Image (cartoon, helix red, strand yellow):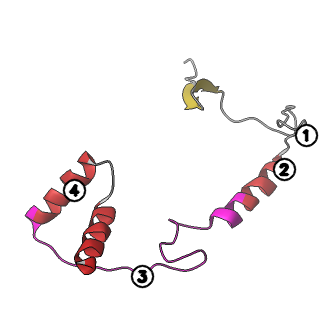
Amino acid sequence: MASRKNTLRINDADVVDGGDIDLDSEEVYLADGTRLTEARVDELADEIRQKVGRGRPSLTGPGRRSPQLRLSVPAELRQQLEARAEHEHTTVSDIAREALERYLAS
């Protein structure tokens, strides 16, 4: 059975995913000319995890957890919100936040 290669789109260019490689036996170099090893990948991944954190970005501020609001709505309203969010390429939460901000500003 032939192996299937995945093609990814990165920066408007098609890139073929050739699967996993052992960076300690294959020679791969970064843009600055340094060799990429398994250890360096682990270091880079740790740096990214520390910078990004876990989950979605806080709406309150860096390093702070955003409070959550939970409410019940009729099924028809939920369906309308989901349809509107899909149409506007956004989320139900974004629409709800905007609606609350507008209401409280009035």
Disc 4 marks which residue?
Answer: 82
- The residue at the point 74 percent across, 61 percent down is 46
Q: How many residues crowd around disc 1 within 10 Å: few (fewer than 14), some, or many (20 or more)? A: few
Image coordinates for residue 9, horizontal then vertical, percent:
55, 30
Q: Quadrant of residue 29?
A: top right
Relative horizontal placement of residue 25, taking residue 41 as reference (left or right): right
Disc 1 marks which residue?
Answer: 34
Callout 2–callout 1 Cβ contact below 8 Å:
yes
Q: Quadrant of residue 20?
A: top right
- The residue at the point 14 percent across, 73 percent down is 73
**How far apart are labels 4 and 2 at the CA level?**
43 Å
**How far apart are labels 4 and 3 at the CA level?**
22 Å
Vertical order, 9 against 46 (above or below): above
Q: Quadrant of residue 52?
A: bottom right
Q: Three-letter amino acid code at disc 1?
A: Thr
Disc 3 marks which residue?
Answer: 67
Dot in front, 4 or 2: 4
Is 72 in the magenta? yes
The C terminus lies in quadrant = bottom left
The N terminus lies in quadrant = top right
Q: Earlier in the sequence, mark 3 or mark 1?
A: 1
Asked which secondary structure carries label 2, the reply is: helix
Disc 2 marks which residue?
Answer: 40
Region rendered in magenta: 48-76
